Image (cartoon, grey):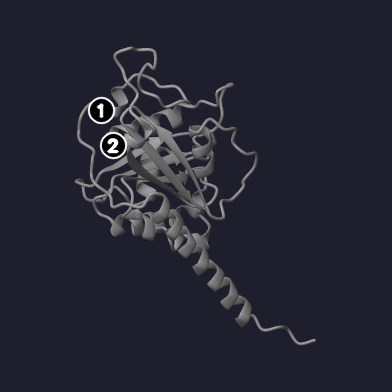
Amino acid sequence: MAPRPLGPLVLALGGAAAVLGSVLFILWKAYFGRGRERRWDRGEAWWSLEPARLPPWVQWDPEDEEAEEPALEELEQREVLVLGLDGSGKSTFLRVLSGKTPLEGHVPTWGFNSVRLPTKDFEVDILEIGGSQNLRFYWKEFVNEVDVLVFMVDAADRLRLPWARQELHRLLDKDPDLPVVVVANKQDLNEALSVVELEQELGLEAVDSQREIFFLAASIAPVGPDFEDAGTVHIWKLLLELLS
């Protein structure tokens, strides 16, 4: 029996990927739907803040009579985009943020995940888009719609660091003004690169010094009954500092 031609299958898969990317963009526009406004300043350094707990992400005492909780409809929105190659820990990061138990094993995201977290003055919408190769093409379409980009890297996956570097630089070129938080994840593994080593491997030591790029080491995984970990706390506190 003669082999079946792959042409129609390739075209079908390509069409499906294009449709998926279009749907992602439409849903993003409908859900978050606004242009980005720069709102961060250089106030108190994020690393000097008091330790926080996860969850909830409330920054005020609800029993304080002087503190009035703003009405939900009056809260402004901030948008954070979480990207990175598949398996870097993006979904686990969102689940820990929202107080959910991380899934066991590697479960790739074929579309997107999102969470909305309230603070005293605004709500933070965090969107994670899958990191598989067919979805990376659409990453750049979302960059201009957010306030901060979190780029998650599996610091122990040395073989795929060149791909992570390529994708990160494409995003940096797309929006030169967007603050970027690079997370060197999976520091609990012996083969994980340090933040300094990862900066070199990603080719970021030569990036314009005026560019706002922040590096954080993390091992995002549940610890204890409340699924807390120091890495997630540090990332969240930095995001609040940039978004305030």
Quadrant including the C terminus: top left
Number of numbered discs on residues: 2
In this view, the residue in front, 41 or 24, is 24
Residue wearing tag 1: 45
Which residue matches tag 2? 242
Q: Establish if 89 lies above or below 145.
A: above
| Three-letter amino acid code at the position of disc 2 | Leu
Q: Secondary structure at mark 2?
A: helix
Considering every residue shown, the one lying at the far right of the view is 1
Q: Is residue 152 left or right of residue 44?
A: right
Which quarter of the figure has residue 79?
top left
At a point 52% along the width and 33% down the height, the residue shown is: 96
Where, quadrant-wise, is the N terminus in this rendering?
bottom right
Asked whether 101 or 190 is in front, the reply is: 101
In front: 143, or 188? 143
Residue 41 pos. (x, y %):
20, 36
Q: Judging from the image, what secondary structure is the residue with disc 1 in? A: loop
Give the CA distance from mark 2 to mark 1. Answer: 10 Å
Is 238 displayed left or right of 43 in the figure? right
Residue 58 in picture, x, y percent from top left: 40, 24
At horizontal 38% and vertical 36% (from top left) the residue drawn is: 216
- Identify residue type, mark 1: Ala
